[in-house]
Amino acid sequence: MDSNLLKKVPKKYHTAITDIYHDEDGYWCVIGCNSGYKLESYYSEYTIHEDNLNQFLSIFEQIVKSNLDFNRVNGFAK
């Protein structure tokens, strides 16, 4: 987890993020599938990848509350 990169992301999304980092392929962020959030109108529901930092940060506006009940869907509900 790159704490300096995380500081650039609005704090309201921090609880949804399970990993965020930059490597030779660009900027990456993983949204926890059981965090209650997902990406809307992006090619992936739980992973952000962009080559450019400005593009990467703009994608966070697409994070929305998820209606997915992770426990029920995966058979963990009582």
Image (cartoon, grey):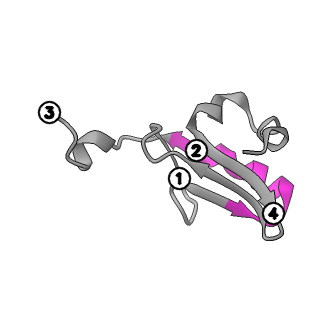
Q: Find out whether the residues at labels 3 and 1 contact each other: C-beta distance under 8 Å.
A: no
In-front residue for pair 6/60? 6
Q: Which residue is tagged 4?
A: 23
Q: Callout 2 environment at 10 Å: few (<14), some (14 to 19), or many (20+)?
A: some
Q: Earlier in the sequence, mark 3 or mark 4?
A: 4
Which residue corresponds to the image point at 14% horizontal and 33% vertical from the top-left? 78
- What is the x, y in percent for residue 56? 76, 55
Q: Position of residue 40 (x, y in %)?
A: 53, 52
Task: Residue at 19%, 37% (x, y): give it.
Answer: 77
Q: Quadrant of the N terminus?
A: top right
Residue sitting at the far left: 78
Q: Which residue is mark 2?
A: 63
Residue annotated with mark 3: 78
The reply to whether the magenta stretch includes residue 44 is no
Can see residue 69?
no
Q: Are marks 2 and 4 in contact (CB under 8 Å)?
A: no
User: Which element type, helix, strand or loop, lies under badge 1?
Assistant: loop
Q: Earlier in the sequence, mark 2 or mark 3?
A: 2
Circle 4 — which element?
strand
Q: Label 1 to label 4, Cα distance in Å? A: 24 Å
Q: Which residues are magenta?
A: 49-64
- Could you tell me the amino acid type at mark 3? Lys
Q: Secondary structure at mark 2?
A: strand
Q: Is residue 43 above or below residue 55?
A: below
Instruction: State the CA–CA distance, disc 2 to disc 3.
Output: 29 Å
Query: Left or right: 22 with respect to 59?
Result: right
Q: Amino acid at mark 4?
A: Asp
Horizontal side of 29 relative to 41 (left or right) equals right
Residue at point 80%, 57% (across, down) = 22
